[in-house]
């Protein structure tokens, strides 16, 4: 549904996007992650039609986004910094968006008042950051978008409200086939909601896979070798550390291959543990000069 093809974007001498390509299938929840400065917010502004690419294309169902009102009516976007008109209340902003989005569901807006329990007639400037985020979600999901784009979506929300928000979003994915692209540094939360993940680095896509496939292709091994035995040279670990006799290895490959390789060492003990998305992020970027470094204080 979403196609990004060889997109380049430069700001003066700085290249923010360097031939970026990615794809998001209809009805999927796609997590876009990467270190600060990787280009995540820049590509989001392209996906929402704010920026025009210097070269390449941004397509939704085969149609370009930039300066295309028909496509933009199918997209809802919640940025990290919420925009609202001065002195406007949530209800005022609702009326504004209702006039732009023909599919706006007023009945749903009223029902969601039971989920987002705050006075929607108060000026949004008087609301906390968390309440402003709630207001943005309440309005966005009532637009009935086909594509929902989220930048740090639940930052500032308490744990209960975070769960409520994700429940509403995932219900729309399941019931209406809404396509969701979410950028966040909260990788633990993304792990619970995303089915596909793309990792960006310096304006490019480092990798793009289904989350299950990504987790099946790399694992953490903890083992204890027999007394006096050492790990063979070129054993193939991405990362290695030790605590006493316990070795911890990060290894690529499926669990069967890794287990067979480690078992051949006749270890006293070994255990195979799936990596979290956060650990995968760290070790994948470790291969492109973003490794964790020891810091002496």
Image: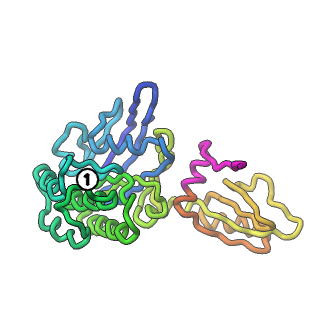
Residue 29: x and y, percent? 36, 59
Q: Which residue lies furthest to the right in this view?
A: 228
Here the colouring is rainbow
Secondary structure beneath disc 1? helix
Q: In which quarter of the image is residue 164?
A: bottom left
**Camera-side residue: 28 or 128?**
128
Query: For this view, does 279 lie left or right of residue 100?
Result: right
Q: Can residue 1 be seen in this view?
A: no
Residue at the farthest top position: 13
Neighbour tally class for label 1: few under 14, some 14-19, many 20 plus, Cα within 10 Å: some
**Residue range (magenta):** 281-297
Is residue 81 or residue 225 the one in the foreground? Answer: 81
Residue at 71% x, 54% y: name it. Answer: 236
Left or right: 295 as drawn, with respect to 189? right
Residue drawn at (47%, 46%) of the image: 200
The residue that appears at 61% across and 66% down in the rendered structure is 255
């Amino acid at each position: 549904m979403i196609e990004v093809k060889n997109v380049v974007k430069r700001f003066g001498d700085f290249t923010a996007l360097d031939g970026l390509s990615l794809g998001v299938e209809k009805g999927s929840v796609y997590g876009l992650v990467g270190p600060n400065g990787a280009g995540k917010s820049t590509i989001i502004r392209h996906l929402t039609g704010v920026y025009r690419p210097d070269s390449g294309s941004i397509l939704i169902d085969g149609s370009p986004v930039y300066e295309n009102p028909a496509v933009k009516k199918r997209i809802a976007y919640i940025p990290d910094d919420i925009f609202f008109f001065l002195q406007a209340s949530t209800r005022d902003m609702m009326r504004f968006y209702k006039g732009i989005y023909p599919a706006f569901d007023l009945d749903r807006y009223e029902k969601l008042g039971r989920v987002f329990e705050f006075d929607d007639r108060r000026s949004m400037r008087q609301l906390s950051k968390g309440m402003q985020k709630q207001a943005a979600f309440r309005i966005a999901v009532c637009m009935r978008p086909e594509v929902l784009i989220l930048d740090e979506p639940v930052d500032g929300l308490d744990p209960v409200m975070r769960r409520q928000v994700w429940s509403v979003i995932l219900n729309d994915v399941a019931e209406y086939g809404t396509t969701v692209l979410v950028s966040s540094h909260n990788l633990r939360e993304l792990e619970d909601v995303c089915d596909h993940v793309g990792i960006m680095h310096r304006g490019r896509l480092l990798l793009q896979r289904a989350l299950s496939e990504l987790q099946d292709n790399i694992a953490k091994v903890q083992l204890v070798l027999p007394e006096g035995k050492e790990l063979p040279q070129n054993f193939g670990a991405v990362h290695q550390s030790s605590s006493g006799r316990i070795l911890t290895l990060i290894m690529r490959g499926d669990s069967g291959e890794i287990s067979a390789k480690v078992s051949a060492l006749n270890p006293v003990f070994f255990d195979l543990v799936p990596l979290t998305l956060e650990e995968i992020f760290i070790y994948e970027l470790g291969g492109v000069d973003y490794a964790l470094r020891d810091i002496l204080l």
